[in-house]
Amino acid sequence: MDFHAYGLAFSHKVGEFSPRLCFEYYFLGYFYTDYLYEKDGALRKGQAGDFMIVPPGKTVYHGTAQDAPRGFINDWLHVGGETLDQLLMRFPLPYLTPIRIDESRLSGAIGRIHHELSYRPEGYRQKCEIIMADTLIEIYRTYKQRQSTRSAAHLSEVRGEIMHDYMQKWTLERMARHAGYSPSRFSSIYKATYGIAPIEDLIRTRIGHAEQLLRYSNMAISEIADAVGFASLYYFSRTFKKQIGTSPSEYRARADLGTE
């Protein structure tokens, strides 16, 4: 890795922006304060505790709004080289996107790299590479864990919505579209999370509600089939028997006799 420049607790005044520059190496920054950054031609707001990578050839542009109570402060590092390219291919992190980290991992790493480059003890270059690799792997782990947590929370929310509206005409394609996945990806994630395919999960929910209606309502079986989302009485009866072991009419008769 080639370490070109770095800054520790670098301070910018209110309304001040860094020069709009492109480099042949990576910009890595850790922000102690809220800030503005440019992406896709628009200014966006970042928060204290953000980590960001700007790849070679992309514009580095950060600043603070005019109405901010203070300017922004960050640690930053310019670093490049084939070793870093390979590291980021193995542990890919999003570019020009704030990544929240609980501790100032990058800040601490820049300080340690600063110490190595300033005093140049034996093996300092190798030490700097080790510090950089260890730091980026830790940030990658944090990023993936949070992505997984957000994905699980989103999937749980989608599942709750589907099961609440179980009587609707849900298909795998509609479920996947609602969740923002392809059908195959949605089915794979769903089954890995809940241990059951999404359509099978929906059918179990429908059958569970049908059991309650058969027990405690006077609705005709055809009405129950429609109420819980089955397209036909035949399909409902066949599915019910497969799930419960008896037909809907037999189930109701046993419930009436108190033998169910």
Image: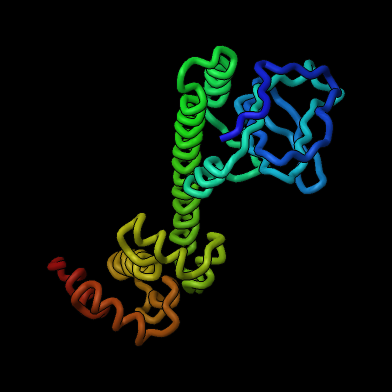
Q: Which of 253 and 243 is in front in this view?
A: 243
Q: Which of 102 and 228 is in front in this view?
A: 102
Q: In this view, does 173 lie to the left or right of 191?
A: right
Q: Which of 117 and 156 is in front in this view?
A: 117
Furthest residue to the top? Answer: 119
Q: Where is residue 116 in the image (x, y as percent from the top left)?
A: 53, 17
**Residue 41 to residue 254: above or below:** above
**Residue 53 to residue 214: above or below:** above
Furthest residue to the front? Answer: 122
Q: Which colour scheme is used?
A: rainbow
Q: Position of residue 11 (x, y in %)?
A: 75, 16
Q: Can residue 9 be seen in this view?
A: yes
Quarter of the picture containing the N terminus is: top right
Furthest residue to the bottom? Answer: 234
Q: Where is residue 60 in the image (x, y as percent from the top left)?
A: 76, 36
Q: How many labels does the image show?
A: 0
**Residue 229 to residue 102: above or below:** below
Quarter of the picture containing the C terminus is: bottom left
Q: Residue at x 50, y 74 (%)?
A: 169
User: Where is residue 33, by image quadrant?
Assistant: top right
Q: Is residue 111 left or right of residue 4?
A: left
Q: Which residue is drawn at 22% across and 74% down?
A: 251
Q: Which residue is drawn at 57% across and 33% down?
A: 100
Q: Residue at x 51, y 26 (%)?
A: 125
Q: Can residue 153 be seen in this view?
A: no
Q: Position of residue 173 (x, y in %)?
A: 51, 72
Q: Is residue 16 left or right of residue 99?
A: right
